[in-house]
Image (tube, coloured by chain):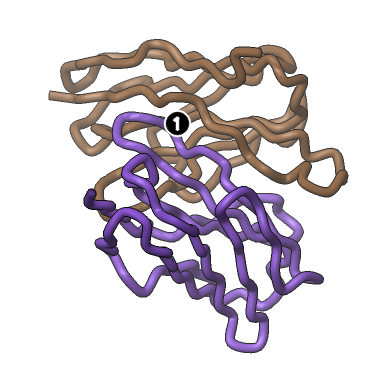
Chain colours: A purple, B brown
Amino acid sequence: GESVGLHLPTLSVQEGDNSIINCAYSNSASDYFIWYKQESGKGPQFIIDIRSNMDKRQGQRVTVLLNKTVKHLSLQIAATQPGDSAVYFCAEINTGFQKLVFGTGTRLLVSP
Amino acid sequence: NAGVTQTPKFQVLKTGQSMTLQCAQDMNHNSMYWYRQDPGMGLRLIYYSASEGTTDKGEVPNGYNVSRLNKREFSLRLESAAPSQTSVYFCASSELSGRVGGDTQYFGPGTRLTVL
């Protein structure tokens, strides 16, 4: 079956460091991927997305990398700030059903 | 724009009681979704509505019903609440127009439901 999962449940970094959050997916037919950030007590917030015809996309302080060969997705956050502390989810679109499949999430803890 | 709004924010029910969770979006999106989020389980799709007038089951539909009242509103009903339905419920919407980025789902703030 298809699944989206994360390698690390918790990632602790120092303020100013770069953070890398990883995600593996198993459905090679997925063609669209999204990273969400969820702060405590709030709903998931869109961060950045990438389509399967790309291998890199950059936003403000964030970069998403897609490696289709090994079915791996990563989110890089530059100069991590305390406000980046949250749970980060990757999600893939289930081709043909337009339904997102979410991973269980990685908690990012940023200490001053 | 308020985006996606949900009511209520918190609710406590007794086993067997019924209630309806309300969701509305002001982004003129075609598709709307209901998820539940449990610790360690991530987000699981309950029901979705690809367009006004249609609804379909997601991964965990048992014990729930939905109504797509109009393009803006999508409600989730628990007819006879059970403790297993204690969870945080999120509504989401997406444009789903075929445009690049149209698949992105935008989420509401959630409803925290406890069933005793």
- In the shown orientation, is residue A1 left or right of residue B81? right
Q: Quadrant of residue B98?
A: top right
- In the shown orientation, is residue B23 left or right of residue B7? right
Q: Residue at x 55, y 57 (%)?
A: A91
**Above or below, B47 relative to A11:** above
Host chain of mark 1: B
- In the shown orientation, is residue A35 left or right of residue B95? left
**Above or below, B47 relative to B113:** below
Task: State how many labels appear.
Answer: 1
Q: Residue at x 23, y 38 (%)?
A: B84
The residue at which mark 1 appears reads as B90
The percent position of residue A79, horizontal first and vertical second, equals: 44, 56
Q: Nearer the viewer, residue A98 or A50?
A: A50
Label 1 element class: strand
The percent position of residue B72, horizontal first and vertical second, equals: 69, 15
10 Å neighbourhood of mark 1: few (<14), some, or many (≥20)? Answer: many
Q: Residue at x 52, y 63 (%)?
A: A75
The percent position of residue A52, horizontal first and vertical second, equals: 75, 69
The percent position of residue A92, horizontal first and vertical second, equals: 60, 60
- In the shown orientation, is residue A1 left or right of residue A41? right
Q: As shown in the figure, which amino acid type bears the numbered disc 1?
A: Phe
Looking at this view, name the residue that lies furthest to the bottom.
A69
Q: Residue at x 12, y 24 (%)?
A: B116
Q: Nearer the viewer, residue A68 or B59?
A: A68
Q: Nearer the viewer, residue A28 or A90?
A: A90
